[in-house]
Amino acid sequence: MRSPREQDDYLEHGRFGEGEHAPPLTRAGLIRAIVAFAVAPLAVPATFYVNDLLFSRLPDPFGDYLALLIFAYPAELVFGLPAWFAFKHYRVTSILLHLAAGGLIGGLVALILRPHGYFALVFLLAASSSALLFRCISGSN
């Protein structure tokens, strides 16, 4: 049971105790986050390129892969930015949770675009690889 002081703190500030909220973002952390947001969506066409190279055909480097960025950057802003804020707020640093969140985001994009069968799995893998790249660049929260 929480003390009355802790409950008052929760009602006033929306949290229990002073140490349970995320620390402020440093300048270096902000720069890493900006670079991560700029670079991480590039993993989406790279994943589709490797998929085509391994499983289907000789890939055309300037074909459909660059068009995937039309979907990757907006998906990152719409789904990835709120996920990053939530991870930052709750101090989530787990690589597995970043992969799972990326897969969920890829699943949402796949539901919107409605690819068939196998390509839905590639969307999941591409978004997970983008989330992993983001986590590697931005570092732990």
Image (spheres, rainbow, N blue to C red):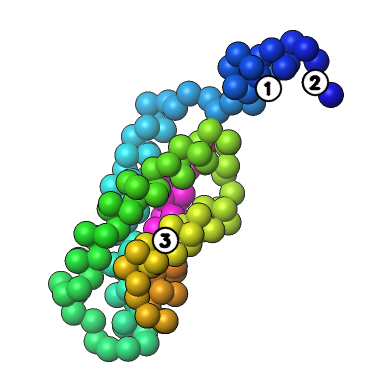
Please provide percent x and percent y for residue 32. Answer: 37, 39
Identify the amino acid type marked 3. Leu
Question: Callout 3: few (<14), some (14-19), or many (20+) C-alpha neighbours within 10 Å?
Answer: some
The answer to whether 6 is drawn above or below residue 118 in the figure is above
The alpha-carbon separation of the residues under discs 3 and 2 comes to 38 Å
The alpha-carbon separation of the residues under discs 3 and 1 comes to 33 Å
Q: Residue drawn 68% across and 22% down?
A: 16
The alpha-carbon separation of the residues under discs 2 and 1 comes to 9 Å
Q: Which segment did they paint magenta?
A: 130-139
Identify the amino acid type marked 1. Phe
Residue matched to label 1: 16
Residue matched to label 2: 2
Identify the amino acid type marked 2. Arg
Q: N-terminal of the two: label 3 or label 2?
A: 2
Residue matched to label 3: 108
Q: Residue furthest left?
A: 62
